[in-house]
Image (spheres, grey):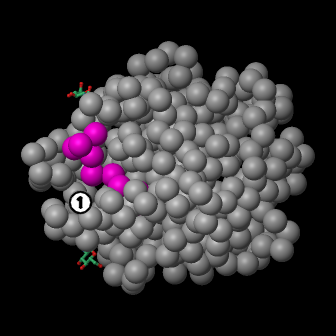
Amino acid sequence: MRLTLSAVSLLGFLLAAQASSDNHGHKDASCGSSKKIVKGKAFDRIIQVWLENTDFEAAHADPNLQALAKEGLTLSNYFGVTHPSEPNYVASVGGEYFGINNDNLFRVPRNVSTVVDLLEDKGMSWAEYQEDMPSTGFDGFEFRNPTTGANDYVRKHNPLIIFDSVASDPSRAANIKNFTLFEKDLAANQLPQWIFITPNMTNDGHDTNVTFAGTWSRGFLEPLLKNPHFNDHKTLVILTFDENEGGAHNRIFTILLGGAIPKEMIGQVDDSFYDHYSTIATVEANWDLHTLGRWDVGANVFDFVAEKTGDVTRTPENIDTIGLNVSYPGIFNTGHLAKQPVPNTKLVVNGRTVLPAIQKEWESQVECTGYFGQLVPPSALTPPPVPSGC
Ligand SMILES: *[C@@H]1O[C@H](CO)[C@@H](O)[C@H](O)[C@H]1NC(C)=O
Ligand SMILES: *[C@@H]1O[C@H](CO)[C@@H](O)[C@H](O)[C@H]1NC(C)=O
Ligand SMILES: *[C@@H]1O[C@H](CO)[C@@H](O)[C@H](O)[C@H]1NC(C)=O
Ligand SMILES: *[C@@H]1O[C@H](CO)[C@@H](O)[C@H](O)[C@H]1NC(C)=O
Ligand SMILES: *[C@@H]1O[C@H](CO)[C@@H](O)[C@H](O)[C@H]1NC(C)=O
């Protein structure tokens, strides 16, 4: 582990945060595809593929996922952040899930930024490919197979369309497209640098099981990994699940694949603590982006990337007691409402500051923030701290 100057400044901040949050009884301060390619420190392109609702052990036992694991790096302590599906997808791009505790139709207010704002700030291209989405930028609740009536596409598994800062901007909504266009963009050598793929409800295991999802994943990924149009530019693929089947621990099987993985790590296991916020943190570290000032700031960067960026990989006090299984209060929580959370515009991690546009929008309310760079994100049992007077 290397302690850089800026990591030290985060630690200094964390200590201050610890002191103040302890006063409130809080204990957890542990610490456009035509664009040019922006080089990253450990990879030049990232593709996330999300499967559904499977316990770590069940996925680990699946022969097709095992075969893929041998070709990549397994993350054995990667966690979903709550239940059910939708808040996990929201968290993966927003650094926060706003208390969501069901799969209803939500619209996150326009003044909330996402990873898209961070990428576009550096002029980087991005897209989502959603299988069976009926039209580009479609913001409806679902789309059923016209012949069989079976589940095809669902909005709850489409993270960015849930954010009004994306959905209500036509140039952004144009990047949320049908999965069929993935093959087309690939063939034209026009895949963007940040990609999120959601298979349909059959292929992702939601309406089937891990055997089906594992077969689909291997069938999709193995040819791609051999395709130089795809596996060039130091590509990183993340194959993960949104959540486990509902148990307390919410640990999910995650494999990192692609040319970006150092040769000596192929077939190995990384047991560092990660969660869905780690993927945003890794993207930020790799391209030296700004941050959202939310749970992305404290999350561990994937270790093989952290070694290149100088980020510090931290260890939670007791990984066995982590129960990211019930949503904490928020603007969308059906049981316990809480105010819209304020990003901590002052956080700095390894030299990365909060996006200037976010600072401008929120700095006047920063005394009400609950984000202090915590490593383990909150859950219903350990909700985010609320400073007094807020
Ligand atoms: C953000 O937008 C929501 C919904 O429009 C509003 O209630 C909230 O006050 C806004 N917050 C800020 C800081 O502008
Ligand atoms: C969307 O993709 C599905 C297959 O995933 C295809 O059957 C359908 O025609 C596509 N629809 C559009 C509008 O491109
Ligand atoms: C899901 O996609 C596959 C192709 O990958 C297709 O055969 C299947 O019909 C789709 N599922 C549904 C419910 O339409
Ligand atoms: C998944 O379902 C298929 C078909 O019903 C079955 O053959 C397979 O054993 C199931 N897999 C698991 C892990 O239960
Ligand atoms: C959530 O996790 C905690 C800690 O592991 C556990 O005590 C609790 O029973 C779990 N709750 C549910 C609803 O699974």
The answer to whether residue 384 is left or right of residue 230 is left
Residue ID at (85%, 69%):
263
The answer to whether residue 176 is left or right of residue 265 is left
Residue marked by disc 1: 20
Query: Circle 1 — which element?
Result: helix
Choose between 341 and 362: the one closer to the eye.
Answer: 362
User: Visible in this render: residue 246?
Assistant: no
User: Visible in this render: residue 20?
Assistant: yes
Q: Residues within 10 Å of mark 1 (few under 14, many from 20)?
A: few
Q: Position of residue 40 (x, y in %)?
A: 74, 45
Disc 1 residue: CB within 8 Å of ligand 1: no
The quarter of the picture where the C terminus appears is top left
The quarter of the picture where the N terminus appears is bottom right
* Figure label count: 1
Q: Position of residue 160 (x, y in %)?
A: 46, 35
Q: Position of residue 356 (x, y in %)?
A: 47, 29
Q: Is residue 304 above or below residue 202?
A: below
**Chief secondary structure of the magenta span?**
loop
- Residue 368 is one of the magenta-drawn residues: yes
Choose between 382 and 168: the one closer to the eye.
Answer: 382
Residue found farthest to the top: 170
Q: Quadrant of residue 341?
A: top left
Q: Position of residue 327 (x, y in %)?
A: 26, 58
Q: Is residue 169 above or below residue 62?
A: above
Q: Which residues are magenta?
A: 366-374
Residue ID at (39%, 70%):
30
Residue ID at (30%, 65%):
18
Disc 1 residue type?
A: Ser
Residue ID at (52%, 71%):
314
- Residue 306 is one of the magenta-drawn residues: no
Quadrant position of ligand 5? bottom left
